[in-house]
C-alpha cells in the first residue's frame, strides 16, 4: 500500500486524524488555507491558538503546535509555520523542511495515523512551488521510512498548478 496520497480539493473537508495548517507565527488565522481552516473549525480553534500564544509567544517559522480540530471532522489541527520567501539565502529551504518534519513528529506523538498537508509557504509567503513540493515530498518520504505509526500522508492541493507539480514529482521513479 502506498502511504502517500495526493488529492485536489479543500483540506477542511478531509476525514483524516489531523490536518496541517499553513499558519502564521501569531497563530491567529489569516488568509488562504489558514483562514479557511480557522473559519471551518470555529471559535474554539482560535481560543486554543491564543492559549498557546500566551504560553509560548506564538510559533516561530519551522516549528509546529497542535490543537483540537474544533468543528472539523479531524481530531487535530497541526499549525506549522513556514518561511516567508526572501531569495533563498535566509535558510528558507531548511525552515520549510523543519515545518514538515516537526508536524510529523507532533502527529506521531499524538498517535495520528492519517494526516493531510497543504502546500506550506507557497501562497502569500511566496516560496517557489516546485522546490517547496520537492522539500515536502522528501521530508515525508524520509519520515515514513523511519516510522510506521503514520499510515497515510495526504498532500491536499487546492489549486491545479500545485496538484500537477505534486503529481509529476510523486510519479517519478524514486
Image: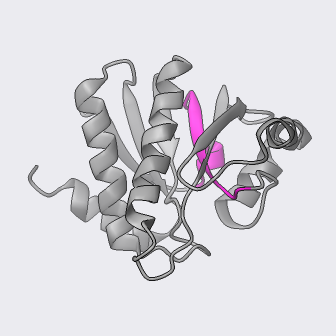
- Tally of marks: 0
Instruction: Give coordinates of residue 34: x percent, y percent.
Output: 70, 57
Left or right position of 117 against 150:
right
Q: Is residue 107 above or below residue 94?
A: above
* Residue 76 drawn in magenta: no
Where on the picture, by quarter, is residue 131?
bottom left
Left or right position of 52 against 167:
right
Identity of the residue drawn at 49% across and 60% down: 119
Instruction: Give coordinates of residue 27: x percent, y percent.
Output: 76, 51
Identity of the residue drawn at 53% across and 29% down: 106
Front-most of 160 and 68?
Answer: 68
Front-most of 29 and 85?
Answer: 85
Left or right position of 159 against 55:
left
Identity of the residue drawn at 51% across and 70% down: 122
Q: Can the viewer see residue 165 in this picture?
A: yes
Q: How is the image coloured?
A: one colour
Identity of the residue drawn at 37% across and 24% down: 151
Instruction: Give coordinates of residue 67: x percent, y percent.
Output: 72, 32
Name the residue furthest bottom. 87
* Residue 15 drawn in magenta: yes
Instruction: Give coordinates of residue 85: x percent, y percent.
Output: 51, 75
Q: Can the viewer see residue 74 in this picture?
A: no
Quadrant where the N terminus is found in the figure: top left
- Part of the protein shown in magenta: 10-25
Q: Is residue 15 above or below residue 11?
A: above
Front-most of 56 and 12?
Answer: 56
Amino acid at each position: 500500500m502506498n502511504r502517500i496520497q495526493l488529492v485536489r480539493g479543500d483540506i477542511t473537508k478531509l476525514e483524516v486524524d489531523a490536518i496541517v495548517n499553513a499558519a502564521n507565527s501569531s497563530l491567529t488565522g489569516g488568509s488562504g488555507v489558514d483562514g479557511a481552516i480557522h473559519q471551518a473549525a470555529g471559535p474554539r480553534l482560535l481560543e486554543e491558538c491564543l492559549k498557546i500564544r500566551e504560553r509560548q509567544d506564538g510559533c516561530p517559522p519551522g516549528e509546529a503546535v497542535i490543537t483540537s480540530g474544533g468543528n472539523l471532522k479531524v481530531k487535530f489541527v497541526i499549525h506549522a509555520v513556514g518561511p516567508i520567501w526572501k531569495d533563498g539565502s535566509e535558510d528558507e529551504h531548511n525552515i520549510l523542511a523543519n515545518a514538515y518534519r516537526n508536524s510529523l513528529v507532533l502527529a506521531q506523538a499524538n498517535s495520528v495515523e492519517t494526516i493531510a498537508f497543504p502546500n506550506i509557504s507557497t501562497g502569500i509567503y511566496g516560496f517557489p512551488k516546485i522546490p517547496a513540493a520537492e522539500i515536502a515530498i522528501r521530508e515525508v518520504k524520509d519520515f515514513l521510512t523511519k516510522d510506521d505509526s503514520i499510515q497515510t500522508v495526504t498532500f491536499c492541493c487546492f489549486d491545479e498548478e500545485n496538484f500537477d507539480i505534486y503529481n509529476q514529482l510523486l510519479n517519478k521513479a524514486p
